[in-house]
Amino acid sequence: MSNSTLDRPPVSTLLETLFTEAEARDGSIRKDLAARSPEERAAFMASASTDYRDFYGRARDLFLPVSRETGRLLYLLARASKARSIVEYGTSFGISTLHLAAALRDNGGGLLIGSDLEPGKVAQARRNVAAAGLEDLVEIREGDALETLAHDLPVSIDLVLLDGAKVLYPRILALLEPRLARGALVLADNADDSPEYLARVRDAGHAYVSVRFADDVELSLNA
């Protein structure tokens, strides 16, 4: 049996429950989008960029989680880098949070600061973190991340997960950049939806070594 916190109850059993619920709940919107015309699908997705508050307000009941594979990747990256300070943009119901906090536990401790716009998601994420026994490692802030992540952060940040409104990825990265440790990792989920972000981390003029990882994950290192 694995010695990792990730693969032992209560974390493992809670994650399985949450992933199963996410697949059932979010499957409805996928079916609805599949039935729409290409133009309607494009307009729906574009609304996340033109008015992200409204878009995520309408998606307040959806998990919109990282995949199972990306979740395990987050755990592996946090363990391999011996991360002690993590910032997560887009907590949702806390699936990615649990993976990262489990890594902090196995690294010997630390702090994960998360942020989400929706009060209901923040409340449920906090309950999930407590149910997993990881609440001593996690602080989840409610509100727009441009405000909640603009203050009271660790002096040095080891790992960042970007998984909120894609249109804000460049601005959130710029907000956190002054505190990124040398060698810090930044993982952006669904990065293809933020061309400006990809241009920034792939530009040789910036301080990143960046690579496309899996279907639409961008993994960058602050070199």
Image: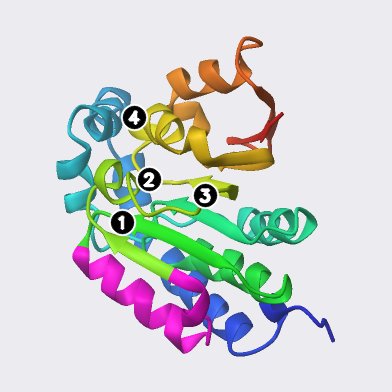
Calculate the distance from the C-alpha at mark 2 to the C-alpha at mark 3: 23 Å
Determine if residue 120 is in view: yes
Q: Which amino acid does label 3 sit on?
A: Val
Calculate the distance from the C-alpha at mark 4 to the C-alpha at mark 3: 26 Å
Q: Which of marks 2 and 3 is nearer the N terminus?
A: 3
Name the secondary structure under disc 4: helix
Pinpoint residue 66: horizontal percent, then vertical percent. Answer: 52, 54
Calculate the distance from the C-alpha at mark 2 to the C-alpha at mark 1: 8 Å
Q: Mark 4 points at which residue?
A: 167
Q: Depth-wise, is mark 4 or mark 3 nearer the camera?
A: 3
In which quarter of the view is residue 203 placed?
top right
Query: Residue 215 lies in magenta, yes or no?
Result: no
Q: Residue 164 carries which label?
A: 2
Name the secondary structure under disc 1: strand
Q: Earlier in the sequence, mark 3 or mark 1?
A: 1
Residue 212 is left or right of residue 134, and the answer is right
Q: Name the residue under label 3.
A: 155
Q: Which amino acid does label 4 sit on?
A: Val
The residue at 37%/54% (across/down) is: 152
